[in-house]
Image (tube, helix red, strand yellow):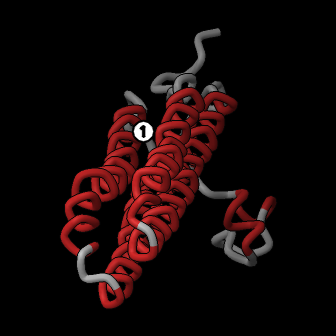
Amino acid sequence: MASATCQSAYCNQGWSEVLTHMSPYGFANFGIAFGLGLSVVGAAWGIWLTGSSLVGAAVKAPRIRSKNLIRRVWSGVDCWNSTAIYGVIMAIILANKVKKPEEAASSLSEDWDWAGYYYAGYGMFSSGLSVGLTNIASGVSVGIAGSSCAIGDAQDSSLFVKILIVEIFASALGIFGIIVGIIQSNSCTFPITALSG
């Protein structure tokens, strides 16, 4: 059967064959991995951006070291922790949606709900990917705002609170991403039995 639809015996002639013949369970698990992995990368990237600027700005104005470090722990790291936690939450939600068929078999029957099967896999992939990408954007934007906050505070201490507000707005991207991911994944349910006809 593989030779009728594929160029090679294992459907691995090129990326188009690999992606079009991949199991929906594979897409669902890649969605879980991307959601979790990209969220952690976004959090780490944001911490790196702010931390490097904080250390550099503290050379010019040592007074900002303790003030910004305490604020970073209070707000910035909290925003980045929530960015990573959004990925963990989405991974848990998506992992609980992956269900195996009731009857163990080497292949699924012809009266299987193929549309629902592929819809669930693709939907979970897009859900995890959207959460991961928005959390990267959230982590980087919070990192850039935190970096500006540290550098601005080294120049003029009255800018600190104003830039901190922008940083809080930037962290809202992550919560928007998880809301979109939950909405996308609501209708993603793997069928566990064949269609009754």
Q: Is residue 86 left or right of residue 64?
A: right
Q: Which residue occupies the foreground of this view, 90 or 107?
A: 90
Mark 1 residue element: helix
Would residue 122 be seen by someone viewing this image from the given angle?
yes
Residue 192 spot, x, y in % from top left: 45, 26
On the image, which quarter does residue 110 sit in?
Answer: top right
Residue bearing the label numbered 1: 94
Residue 129 spot, x, y in % from top left: 57, 52
Q: Which residue occupies the foreground of this view, 140 or 6?
A: 140
Q: Is residue 36 left or right of residue 59?
A: right
Q: Residue at x 45, y 46 (%)?
A: 168
Q: Residue at x 41, y 80 (%)?
A: 53
Would residue 32 be seen by someone viewing this image from the given angle?
no
Q: Is residue 110 left or right of residue 16?
A: left
Depicted 183 relative to depicted 176: above or below: above
Residue 140 spot, x, y in % from top left: 51, 65
Q: Is residue 66 left or right of residue 25?
A: left
